[in-house]
Structures are given as structure tokens and as C-alpha cells.
Amino acid sequence: MKYPIKHKESNTGGIFFISQDNHVITELTYKKREPNIMVIDHTQTKKDLQGKGLASYLLDHVVNYAKENKLKIDPLCPFVEIKFEEIEAYQSLKV
């Protein structure tokens, strides 16, 4: 699966997303807590594309971003919390 992932960031948080035909099809939003903690508070995939692994693909990208930038993740979003429990490689980034 190869989709270009975009990232928009502000002083207080940001969004990672995948778009298709100028419409967001999957998104993951976060707030910044302290300089090195991302609180992931929301993921969403367009209804007709759910179950195709897009949110997991996006989360994997975000986890790699966090590793590269020496960030920790607080998985507040239920989907992300479940993925952090399931995927051992993610657990070292959990706050």
C-alpha cells in the first residue's frame, strides 16, 4: 500500500492525512503536550474505505515520525490505544 501522507502542524498540535481527489480519506489528529509528547486524540477513515488498512498505514507512518523525532505518544484515541496494545514495536513509544 502506497499513499502519500501529508502533515500539517501548529504550535498546539497537528494532523496527518491521506487525500484522494482533493478529499481527505483518512486522518489522524494530535495535540502536543510538553515538547516531546504527541497525544493522538482522533483517527477517522471515510466510511466506504474502512477496513482496508488505511488508518493502520497512517498510524505506522506517525509512529515512525515519532521515532525519528524522539517523541513519545499518548494513545488517547481508542483505535490507536488498541493498536499500541497489539503491536509490540509501538509500546516503547507509549507515555
Image: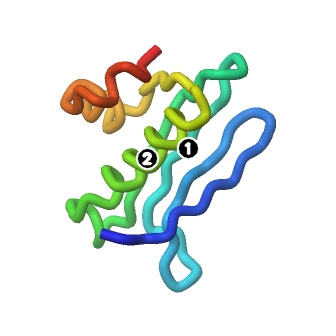
User: Residue 10 sits in which quadrant?
Assistant: top right
User: Residue 71 sits in which quadrant?
Assistant: top right
Looking at the picture, tell me which residue is in the foreground, 69 or 25: 69
The residue under the point 40% across, 46% down is 59
Q: Is residue 30 above or below residue 49?
A: above
10 on left or right of 57: right
Instruction: Residue 19: give x, y in percent of width and height.
Output: 51, 72
Looking at the picture, tell me which residue is in the foreground, 65 or 32: 65
40 on left or right of 60: right
Question: Which callout, 2 or 1, points at the residue further toward the start of the chain?
Answer: 1
Amino acid type, label 2: Thr
Reading the image, the residue beneath label 2 is 43
Q: Is residue 90 above or below residue 55?
A: above
Secondary element type, mark 1: strand
Reading the image, the residue beneath label 1 is 29
Instruction: Residue 42: give x, y in percent of width and height.
Output: 47, 41
The residue under the point 37% across, 71% down is 2
Q: Are marks 2 and 1 in contact (CB under 8 Å)?
A: yes
The residue under the point 64% across, 22% down is 36
Amino acid type, label 1: Thr
Secondary element type, mark 2: strand
Looking at the picture, tell me which residue is in the foreground, 77 or 68: 68
- Return the mark for residue 16: none
Q: Which residue is most to the bottom?
A: 21
Q: Are there few (<14), some (14-19), or many (20+) residues within 10 Å of tag 2?
A: many
